[in-house]
Amino acid sequence: MKRSKKAIVSLLGVLAAEGVIVFLLTCIWTGNIMSGGNTAAMAPSAAPAQQERSVSPPGTALAKATAVPSYEGKKIKNIFKACKKTLVLVNEKEKLKTSYHPSLIPICQGRLQASEYLYDSLAQMLADARDEGYQFYIASAYRSRDKQQRLVDDGVRKRMRRGASYDEAIEKTYNEIMPAGHSEHETGLALDILCSGNMQMDISQKEEPGNKWLCKNCHKYGFILRYPKSKEHITNITYEPWHFRYVGERAANYMRENNMTLEEFWDNME
Ligand SMILES: [Zn+2]
């Protein structure tokens, strides 16, 4: 279930084709999304990928989330009512409605876009992290449905060039890239945050002190680690220590206290 080297190589191709490599080598995140901060930080060792992969083949049913007492269901509903705009559920089963229009603003000196709902919280989180000595690079934020489809198409084309049939190519591609409409990045509420000094979008992020700080503190700013290791059977996505999702402070705190994923939050709502 590890991200394959082939996927990284293919992404390098995608990124290079779009001139993103230049950004990766010059735009190190310094914790200040207003100004972009200084760009003289260390160069990345490799280009980060910009996609998620499903942990099992498409079509695999998501496990039923753990039920909580019914009074909690009402509590969850109340939190939902208060944070509706930031609690949209997008996963393998739940497709983002085409009518969904994320309210986007530029971040990272205009290199990326993200939902305006997370902006202030993100700025505060990164500022506080910087005060603790941690710096980050945001590798990916909002991604349009067209962009997601292009990633899928590129993956399929690459595999077919190597001799795979279309069916084989699409199956393998969907093991690495979410189908268009099913990526959380399309909401503008998801961020792939890498620790400065480690540009690998892989499991090695979890060893970084900066990542540990984020995982421990992100809920205070309304973020959750969206695909935790202990919940792979619920999310159906391989553990991704770099992928953070903004849900709002009340929801994030509740989910942290109750060890819940967004799927479980939705499943237990009354
Ligand atoms: Zn992500």
Image: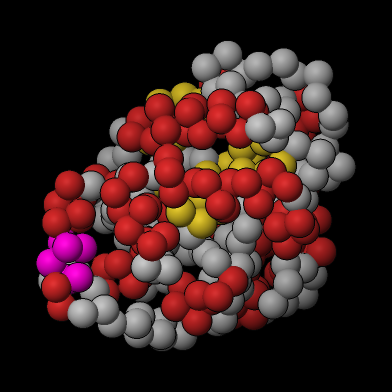
Q: Left or right: where does residue 11 sit relative to residue 84?
A: right
Point 63% across, 58% down: residue: 241
Image position of 76 with respect to 63: above or below: above
Task: Say whether residue 187 is magenta.
Answer: no
Q: Position of residue 235 (x, y in %)?
A: 46, 73
In this view of the protein, which residue sits in the foreground, 166 or 127? 127
Q: Dominant secondary structure of the magenta stretch?
A: helix
Query: What x and y, as percent, mark residue 4?
Result: 77, 68
Q: Quadrant of the N terminus?
A: bottom right
Residue 141 makes an appearance in the image: yes
The residue range painted magenta reads: 72-77
Work out whether residue 147 can be spotted. Answer: no
Specify the quadrant that holds the C terminus.
Answer: bottom left
Which residue is pictured at 61% across the width and 34% down the height?
129
Taking the spot 30% from the left edge, 67% from the top edge, the residue there is 265
Q: Residue at x 36, y 53 (%)?
A: 253
Number of marks: 0
Q: Is residue 242 left or right of residue 258?
A: right
What is the quadrant of residue 264 in the picture? bottom left
Across and down, in percent, residue 259 comes to 42, 68
